[in-house]
Structure formats: C-alpha cells, structure tokens
Amino acid sequence: MKHVISVLVENKFGVLARIAGMFSGRGFNIDTLNVGPTVDPSRSRITTTLNGDDKALEQCVKQLHKLIDVIDIKTYVGTEAVGRELILLKVAANSENRIEVTHICDIFRSKIVNVSADSMIIEVTGNENKVKAFLELIEPFGVTEMARTGTVALSRRS
C-alpha cells in the first residue's frame, strides 16, 4: 500500500541525510522524496511516498519522532490530502506530429514550455492518476528526457 508522509523539520544542515539514513537503515523503500522550504524560513517540509503495510508505516513514524530536528509528522491516506506532482518532459515532436502532441497537452491542461525543430518540453502537474494517463498517451511519440518531482501534499483539514 502506498503511504504519503509529510515531515516538518528544522531547516538545518544534515537533517535530510539523517532522515534518508533512517529510512534506508531500517529497510524502507522510498518511492518519491521531495524537500522544500515552508512559509517559515527556519523550517522545511519533506514529503515522501513509501510502499508498505500499515505496520511498516507505524514503525517509520515512530522512528521519525525520535529524530531531534523533526517538528511534526503527518501521514495521508486516500482523500485526506491534496497531492500533486510536477513533471518536465522532452518529447520528440516534428512538424508531422506536433499538432497531435499539442492536442494531448490541451486535454490534460499541461503547458508547452519550449519548442524546437525536433522536440517540445512539456510541464505537467496533477495527481498520480492524471500524470500516469498523460504519460501513457505521450510515450508513443518518444519521451527523450524526463524530470519528475514526486508527490507533494497538504492536508485538507484546517
């Protein structure tokens, strides 16, 4: 089962390394990992996606609570949170197929951010299902490069 964990941490040197070390040292497999600043510059948010059962998630949260620079931990299941992912991908696109690629981008409300004679760079944001569906339709054109952020999430609750 896929679990999304959001960890609010002190924005200090080595915090990410300690958290990643905790995951790997205890055999947790990280699917995605995203780190970024928060409204408070002294804090960062680490959002990670893990595969495992509920027992593995519980163990992971317990281990995270033991780390000094961890302020808060939230786990998200189902619709408790809003989650998004960002992908930049370079697609082979020439004068013959560019209109079709553009049409797919329009359907998914993605943005074409660069066009050259033989390729296009496309920005796609959305939940995991939207991104997966977009990739399935665009892959036949030839994806030559891709950069993917992984999931970022915030609780729906106030």
Image (cartoon, helix red, strand yellow):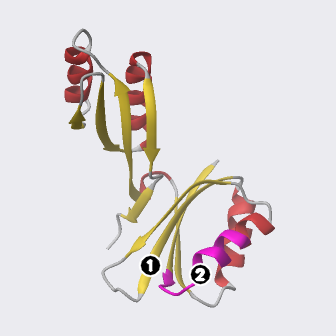
> Earlier along the polypeptide chain: callout 1 or callout 2?
2
Q: Is residue 46 magenta?
A: no
Horizontal and vertical percent position of residue 144: 45, 29
Determine crowd level at label 2: few under 14, some 14-19, many 20+ residues with C-alpha closer than 10 A.
some
Above or below for 120 versus 99: below
Classify mark 1: helix, strand or loop: strand
| Camera-side residue of 116 and 109 | 116
Tally the numbered discs.
2
Quadrant position of residue 49: bottom right
Residue 109 shows in this picture:
no
Q: Say which quadrant the C terminus sits in.
A: bottom left
Above or below for 71 versus 125: below
Residue 129 horizontal side relative to residue 93, left or right: right
Q: Which residue is mark 1?
A: 44
Callout 2 amino acid: Val
As measured in the structure, the alpha-carbon distance from the residue carrying label 1 to the one carrying label 2 is 10 Å
Residue at (63%, 91%) from the top-left corner? 68
Callout 1 amino acid: Ser
Q: Are marks 1 and 2 in contact (CB under 8 Å)?
A: yes
| Camera-side residue of 16 and 143 | 143
Horizontal and vertical percent position of residue 97: 27, 12
Residue at (21%, 20%) from the top-left corner? 103
Residue 104 horizontal side relative to residue 20, left or right: left
Above or below for 145 versus 71: above
Residue at (36%, 27%) from the top-left corner? 91
Considering every residue shown, the one lying at the far right of the view is 26
Provide the residue span drawn in magenta: 9-21
Q: Which residue is mark 2?
A: 15
